[in-house]
């Protein structure tokens, strides 16, 4: 049994190949990692792999082997402005 993140990762692996048949072995390997590590850990690893756009068996296996699936994903941070506020910077009013 797989979860939604595992299913999305399998779809991403198949979509990345010119011929989807080329991704079958990778997908089977990803699903079989659930036998070794358990379905909860596999789901967490696939969620992390999707977040970092690492769509491969090796990436998921590495996440599981190193235990990264047990750590929370870093929160998405809002992009900072390109220029910080500073006294030496001229604003748009300077040029009018």
Image: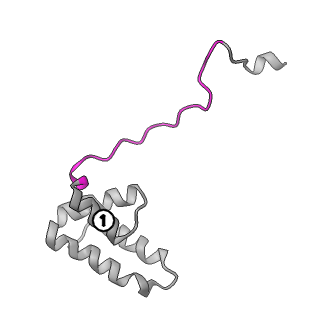
Residue density around tag 1, few if under 14, some if 14–19, many if 20 or more, within 10 Å = many
Q: Which residue is drawn at 20% across and 51% down?
A: 70
Above or below residue 60? Residue 72 is above
Identify the colour scheme used: one colour
To which quarter of the image does residue 20 belong?
bottom left
- Secondary structure beneath disc 1? helix
Q: What residue is pinned by disc 1?
A: 60
Considering depth in this image, is 34 or 5 the residue closer to the camera? 34
Q: Residue 74 in the image: state x and y as whole percent.
A: 34, 43
Region of the chain picked out in magenta, as a range:
68-87
Considering depth in this image, is 61 or 24 the residue closer to the camera? 61
Q: Residue at x 31, y 63 (%)?
A: 46
Q: Residue 19 in the image: state x and y as whole percent.
A: 49, 85
| Residue 73 on the magenta segment | yes
Q: Which residue is drawn at 39% across and 55% down?
A: 51
Q: Residue 57 in the image: state x and y as whole percent.
A: 33, 71
Identity of the residue furthest to the top in this view: 87
Above or below residue 33? Residue 69 is above
The answer to whether residue 78 is left or right of residue 23 is: right
The answer to whether residue 57 is left or right of residue 34 is: right
Above or below residue 51? Residue 8 is below
Above or below residue 19? Residue 47 is above
Identity of the residue furthest to the right in this view: 96
């Amino acid at each position: 049994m797989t979860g939604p993140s595992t299913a999305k990762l399998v779809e991403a692996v198949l979509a990345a190949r010119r011929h989807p048949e080329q991704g079958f072995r990778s997908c089977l390997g990803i699903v079989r990692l659930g036998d070794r590590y358990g379905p909860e850990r596999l789901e967490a690893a696939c969620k992390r792999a999707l977040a970092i756009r690492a769509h491969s068996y090796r990436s998921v296996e590495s996440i599981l082997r190193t235990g990264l699936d047990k750590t929370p994903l870093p929160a998405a941070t809002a992009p900072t402005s390109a220029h910080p506020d500073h006294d030496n910077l001229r604003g748009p009013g300077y040029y009018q």
